[in-house]
Amino acid sequence: MALVRAETVQGFQGLPALRQLGLMVGLAASVALGVAVVLWSQQPGYTLLYANLSSKDAGQVIEALQKSGIVFKVDEATGAVMVESSKLQTARMQLAKDGLPEGNAMGFEMLQKDQGFGTSQFIETARFQRALEGELSRTIATLRNVEAARLHLAIPKRSVFLRDRSDPTASVMVDLYSGRTLDDEQIAAIVHLVSSSVPHLKPGNVTVVNQRGDLLSSSNSTDGLAPSSSQFSYNRKLELTYSDRIHQLLDPIIGTGRVRATVNADLDFTVTERTQEFFNPDLPALRSEQISEDETTAGNVASGIPGAVSNQPPQDAGVQQPGAGVDPGAGSRSATAPINSSKHSVRNYELDKTVSHTKLATGTVRRLSIAVVIDNKQELDENDELVSKPWADDELNRFTTLVKEAVGFDVQRGDTVNIVNSAFVALPEAEVIPEPSLLEQPWIWDVARQAAGALGLLIVVFGVLKPVMRSLADKGAQSMQATAMVPAAAAAGGAGGAGVEDRLSLSGANPQQAQLAAPQVSYEQHLDTAKGAVGEDPKRVAQVVRNWVGEDG
């Protein structure tokens, strides 16, 4: 190894300066290319983590990734955060656990910012409204089917005059996940959530729109569509309940997947209110009584012609005035008149009264129509082979009785049950999903990158470095052979023509043979001998070198 290294150095020193510089530059470029290829093959592929992140969210995401120990990089051109392709889902789940990214919407934290001196009331009101919109947007975005949401509130200024007052309105735009939708109940929940969060906002003034521009809410939904939807949902649930009861009874007997049951329920959603008032004549009660009495007395009253005599009281019939005669009609005039009296009585009686207010239940079953189809039974024949046979009539009647008992069959309502036995068509076998090809595997590109890096490194080593080093080693070996032959040629010159023949024979031999024929002396000894030969007979040494150059060139 030391000899090869010395030959390489000797060969490099034997090159011209310009070629030495070019060779050094080429070797450095080859080594740099090999290192770059190796680093490129070991570098993992990066994928965009989230698009359209704000600077605040990007900073929070980077901080969370650093705490989690997930390798990432930031694109210098766009500022996007990128992670390794193999750890993309892991990074997203980790960020989702931490509630990141929060989004661009800001809530009541806007109110925590320092307000400049002299901020007007209009700015404060607008900031509060913007904070309220942000909070509601965040709340709506927490729904499972909603990826993002935006809310716009139009709140008019309250007026002291009732005629000039306007109701506030709201518009909600929801960005749903791919393949997901919102049902009527979820839309109604969003509408009532917004209307309950804003004073004086009615549910009919809230509009919900999705990212495709479809109107999800309507002002007429509360009048007709919502009750109809709830009624249909109740009807559907009742039918599914009856169908599940039938399956629970027949599946253990006939077999799972070999029973098809459909129930049609006719329901009455009529709302009826009834008020009745009953009186019981057998239980009267005195409620009030009013009695009035009138009495008139007509005796001993003044009568006759007005004057002094008539105004005097009558004399007693039993007392005689002296000197007066007896008047035969005096007894009758002194008798009192009869007394007139009247009495009135009013009595009010209250009868026993009962007032009942009845509201009849809605959604009552008016009629049930049940249709059941069962598959043939499977039995073993004489050859122990599975065959399909229809069910007997008594067995079908038994199944009909079970179904009637399960659904609460009522003849007076007009319920009907129909069970049909028929052979089911075998379902086609599901097509086997082919395995993904090798090129579709996620790890194949990393392996291909590493293989390309290893191949590039081998090309650089064995295609560039090794031939160059071998060439330098060969040139160094030839130079060392020439140096060793100089003293031998000088000695041959003193001994005669035999030395010249030996020199010629050695010069025509290959470098390996020349190295073997040379004396086993050190490099310093060869160098000293060559210097001595040059000093003693430079012409002969120059002739030997000229011959070597001519043969090697």
Image (cartoon, helix red, strand yellow):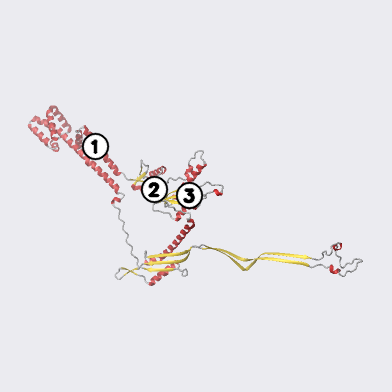
Label 3 vs 1, first from the N-terminus: 1
Task: Name the residue type under label 3.
Answer: Ala
On screen, residue 39 versus residue 194, left or right, reads left
Mark sitting on residue 170:
3
**Residue at figure coordinates x 90%, y 68% from the top left:** 325
Neighbourhood count class around disc 1 (C-alpha, 10 Å): few under 14, some 14–19, many 20 upward: some
Q: Position of residue 412 (x, y in %)?
A: 47, 70
Query: Which numbered dot is residue 108?
Result: none
Q: Which of labels 3 and 1 is toward the front?
A: 3
Is residue 341 visible to us here? yes
Vertical placement of residue 127 versus 21, above or below: below
Q: CA distance from mark 2 to mark 3?
A: 35 Å
Number of marks in the image? 3
What is the quadrant of the C terminus in the image? Answer: top left
Q: Which disc number belongs to residue 26?
A: 1
Q: Amino acid at mark 1?
A: Gly
The location of residue 467, given as percent across then percent down, is 20, 39
In the image, residue 50 above or below residue 317: above
- Quick one: quadrant of the N terminus? top left
First in residue order: circle 2 vs circle 1: 1
Q: Is residue 294 left or right of residue 503?
A: right
Reading the image, the residue beneath label 2 is: 94
Q: Residue furthest right?
A: 323
Residue 3 seen anywhere in this rendered image of the structure: no
Q: Residues within 10 Å of mark 2 (few under 14, many from 20)?
A: some
Q: Quadrant of residue 395?
A: bottom left
